[in-house]
Image: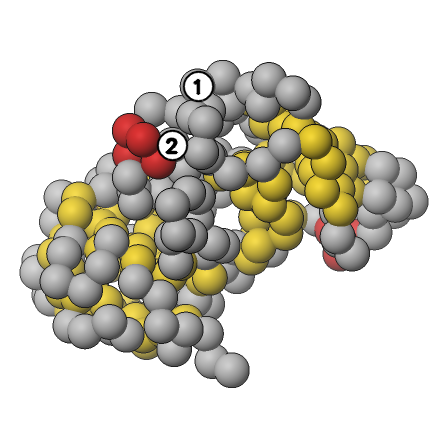
Amino acid sequence: LAKTTQPISMDSYEGQEVNITCSHNNIATNDYITWYQQFPSQGPRFIIQGYKTKVTNEVASLFIPADRKSSTLSLPRVSLSDTAVYYCLVPNLKAAGNKLTFGGGTRVLVKP
Amino acid sequence: NAGVTQTPKFQVLKTGQSMTLQCAQDMNHNSMYWYRQDPGMGLRLIYYSASEGTTDKGEVPNGYNVSRLNKREFSLRLESAAPSQTSVYFCASTERLAGDGFNIQYFGAGTRLSVL
């Protein structure tokens, strides 16, 4: 199965850029990469999704190199409210079908 | 625009009691999921339903049963609750894109379950 690997935690300060890299060496040809954000006591919510190169929305940017074996979520100028757990999800459709499993996520703490 | 609705929000059970967690989505999604999240941990898949009429085991199915009642509703049942099942339970739904990939998953607010 396409297992994802992310750092367990990261600390940052308000106003800085935060980059979280997810490794997914066994990504399949038709797999998209999706990132979710989870605040304490809430369900995860979608941040961004991409297949290759760069995707940007009002919340974040997602960088995917040509080999697609990793992806980097970039959060520009973070604030205290960006403190959350961030999950990278690669479905591995070929092997797992509709079975969507999450890794441990990256706990981001933004300090004042 | 409700999205995914879970009931109840909180529940306290005694060991050995049974209960059913309810989940409903109004986005006409085919696929629905149940996850559990223990304190400080990530999400673990319990069961999922790729489409109405089908259910499959996830990573941690023991002690649980599910029912895909119709396209909207997917329930999770604990037949004999144990303290190890104390957790936050999240329901999610999604749609598989035509041919490739998945649309995004939408999650409910969760059910906080304590088993004493």
The residue tagged 2 is A92
Of the numbered discs 1 and 2, the one sitting upstream in the chain is 1
Relative to residue B32, is residue B81 drawn left or right?
left
Percent position of residue B16, x then y? 8, 60
Q: Is A51 or A21 nearer to us in this picture? A: A51
Percent position of residue A99, x then y? 29, 42
Does the image show residue B7?
yes
Question: Which quadrant, please, contains the N terminus of chain A?
Answer: top left
Which residue is outermost to the right?
A15
Crowding around mark 1 (Cα neighbors within 10 Å: few <14, some 14 to 19, many 20+) is: some
Q: Quadrant of residue B31?
A: bottom left
Relative to residue B26, is residue A89 drawn left or right?
right
Q: Is B79 or B44 nearer to us in this picture? A: B44
Q: Are marks 1 and 2 in contact (CB under 8 Å)?
A: yes
Q: Residues at marks 1 and 2, common chain?
A: yes
Which residue is outermost to the front?
B99
Q: Is A68 or B80 nearer to us in this picture? A: A68
Which residue is outermost to the bottom?
B1
Does the image show residue A13?
no
Colour option used: secondary structure
Q: The residue marked by circle 2 belongs to what chain?
A: A
Q: The residue marked by circle 1 belongs to what chain?
A: A
Q: Residue at x 23, y 42 (%)?
A: B58
Secondary structure of the residue carrying tag 2 is loop
Relative to residue A100, is residue A79 drawn left or right?
right
Relative to residue B31, is residue A73 depicted above or below? above
Percent position of residue A73, x then y? 69, 36
The residue tagged 1 is A26
Q: Residue at x 43, y 26 (%)?
A: A28
Crowding around mark 2 (Cα neighbors within 10 Å: few <14, some 14 to 19, many 20+) is: many
Secondary structure of the residue carrying tag 1 is loop
